[in-house]
Image: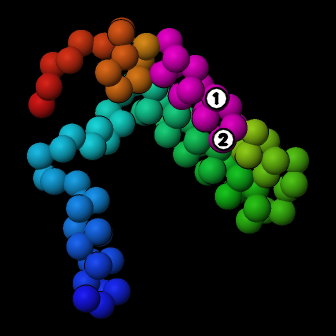
Amino acid sequence: MSKTTVSASKAAETVASHSDAIGHGNSPAAWTCVIVMLVGALVSSIAFVIANSPVFWGGLVIMVVGLLAGWAMRKAGYGVGGSKLKNAGH
């Protein structure tokens, strides 16, 4: 048996089936995190183009704040499967 056959069979065992739910992060915590981080990226991008270092670093700080806000909201129960959300399904 060649190594290719062995590695291919092991890879096939680890592939998830289509029936497994992968989550996608549809929650208030995820949306808040992404939106705040996008605003921070926009601020940093504009500051980079106009060569304004303090505003650039401010945009990076906004991105970190977005990450922390998403984490805090997840811990507060607003993440996927959180205690504050109703599972309406789709």
How much space separates mark 2 and mark 1, taking CA atoms? Answer: 9 Å
* Residue in view at x 31 percent, y 42 percent: 24
Please name which of the two marks, 2 or 1, marks the residue nearer to the observer: 1
* Residue in view at x 48 percent, y 22 percent: 74
Question: Which element is circle 1 on?
Answer: helix
Q: Are marks 2 and 1 in contact (CB under 8 Å)?
A: no
Mark 1: which amino acid? Leu
Mark 2: which amino acid? Met
In this view, the residue farthest toward the bottom is 2
The label shown at residue 63 is: 2
Whether residue 14 is situated above or below residue 72 in the rendered picture: below
**Residue picked out by circle 1:** 68
Q: Position of residue 25 (x, y in %)?
A: 36, 36
Q: How would you rate the neighbour count of disc 1 (Cα within 10 Å): few for under 14, some for 14-19, many for 20 or more? A: few
Closer-to-camera residue (32/11): 11
Q: Position of residue 81 (x, y in %)?
A: 32, 21
Left or right: 44, with 16 as reference point: right
In this view, the residue farthest toward the front is 1
Q: Position of residue 35 (x, y in %)?
A: 50, 38
In this view, the residue farthest toward the top is 84
Closer-to-camera residue (2/23): 2
**Position of the N terminus by quadrant:** bottom left
Q: Position of residue 86 (x, y in %)?
A: 24, 12
User: In which image quadrant can residue 84 be found?
Assistant: top left
Q: Which residues are magenta?
A: 62-76
Left or right: 60, with 72 as reference point: right
* Residue in view at x 32 percent, y 33 percent: 26
